[in-house]
Amino acid sequence: MNAPDSNDPQLLAGLIGQLNVGLFVLDPEFRLRLWNRFMELNSGRSAAEVLGRVIFDLFPEVDEPWLRKKVETVFQIGGYAFTSANQRPYLLRFDHHRPVTGGIDYMRQDCTFLPLQGPDGRIAHVGVSIVDVTDKIISEVQREEALARLGDISIRDGLTGIFNRRQLERSLEAEVSRVRRYGGELSVVMFDIDHFKQINDSYGHRAGDEVIQAVVGYTCGVLRQPDIAGRYGGEEFTLILPETGAQGAMVVSERLRETLERADIHVGGQSLGVTVSVGLSSFRADVADHEALLDEADRALYRAKSDGRNRVVMYRPANP
C-alpha cells in the first residue's frame, strides 16, 4: 500500500478544511486567497464569497492600520509574528456561543502570522491562523474574579460591604502616617445606633441586620468619595475623613445624625425611627498614633450617649 503523497493538493485541502483552527491567506494587496471551513462557519461567509476580495472591505471591524503593519512586517522580514488574546482580544469579531461568558463578548483569539514562499523563494503570501482561546480566557477571568472576591472578603464586613475593623484600622494608620509626614487634616468619627438592643429584642436579629444595612446605606450617601466607612463592631461604625478638620467633621457628623433621624427605615412591613450617637476627634501633633485617635473618638461617643443620645460630641483634650 502506497503512503499518501504529502504534496497532494486534495489531501492538503481536506486537512485544512477539517482543522478546528481558522486559516486564511492574504496576498500583498490584502486579498483573501484561502478561507477554510472554520472561517466559513464562524464568519457566516463562504470561501466562494470572500476569495479574491480585500479583507477590509468584507470585515470593516478589523483594525486596518494594525493588521497592515503586522502583515507587511512578515512580508518584509520573512519571520513569524504572533498576537495573543491578552494583547488584542480578537482579529475578526466572531461570536463564541458559550452560555457562560465570564464577561466575554466575542471569541477570544490567538493569532499567528506565517510567511509563505512563492516558487522564486520570495514571500508571496502571509497565512494567518486563528485559535479560539475563549474557554481559557473565561477561566482566567473567573479565576481573577474569585481571587478578587477572596481578597475583598478579607477586608469587607460580610453584612454591610464596608471595611471590617481590621482594614479600617489599617486605613487609619496609613492616614495618620500620611498627615504626620506631609501635613494636612484628618478626622475620625465613631457612631452607633441608639437602643439597638431593643430593636433586636422586639423584631429579631434579622430585622436588626436590616436596620444596620439601611443605616450604612444612608451613611454612604452622606460621605464624599475619599471618605472611608467601616463597621467597628456590632452596631458601631467608624468614618475616616481625610483632609477634614474638626469643623468639617462636625458638619459631616451633624448631617449624618439628621439624615438618620429623618430616615424612614422599613423592617418587616413596619417603619422604624432610628437615631445615632456620634463622637469625633481630629488629628493633632500630640496624638500618639491611630489607636489614640480612635480612643478619643470613642470617648466622645461615650459622652454623647451619656448626655442623652442622638447628638454629636467632639473630643476636646484637657488643658495641660
Image (tube, rainbow, N blue to C red):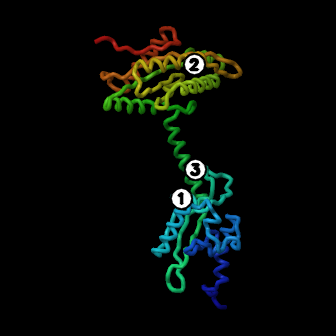
Q: Is 160 in front, or is 76?
A: 76
Q: CA distance from mark 3 to mark 2?
A: 39 Å
Residue 218 occupies which quadrant of the picture? top right
* Mark 2 lies on residue: 260
User: Quarter of the image containing the N terminus?
Assistant: bottom right
Mark 1 vs 2, N-terminal side:
1
Which residue in the protein does label 1 denote?
88
Count of numbered badges drawn on the protein: 3
Question: What amino acid does circle 1 point to?
Answer: Arg
Residue where numbered disc 3 is placed: 142
Position of residue 272 in the picture relative to residue 240 (left or right): right
**Kind of residue sitting beneath label 2:** Leu
Of 252 and 68, the residue lying toward us: 68
For marks 3 and 2 on the same chain, the one whose residue lies earlier in the sequence:
3
Residue at mark 3 to residue at mark 1: CA–CA distance = 19 Å
Q: Residue at x 58, y 71 (%)?
A: 30
Look at the picture and state if 118 lies above or below 295.
below
Q: Residue visible at 61% across and 49% down?
A: 103
- Percent coordinates x, y for residue 152 in the rendering: 52, 39
Q: Earlier in the sequence, mark 3 or mark 1?
A: 1
Disc 2 on helix, strand or loop?
Answer: helix
Question: In the orientation shown, which residue stands out farthest toward the top?
Answer: 307
At mark 1, the secondary structure is: loop
Is residue 49 shown left or right of residue 218? right
Residue in the picture at 67% in, 64% down: 43
Q: Which mark is residue 270?
A: none
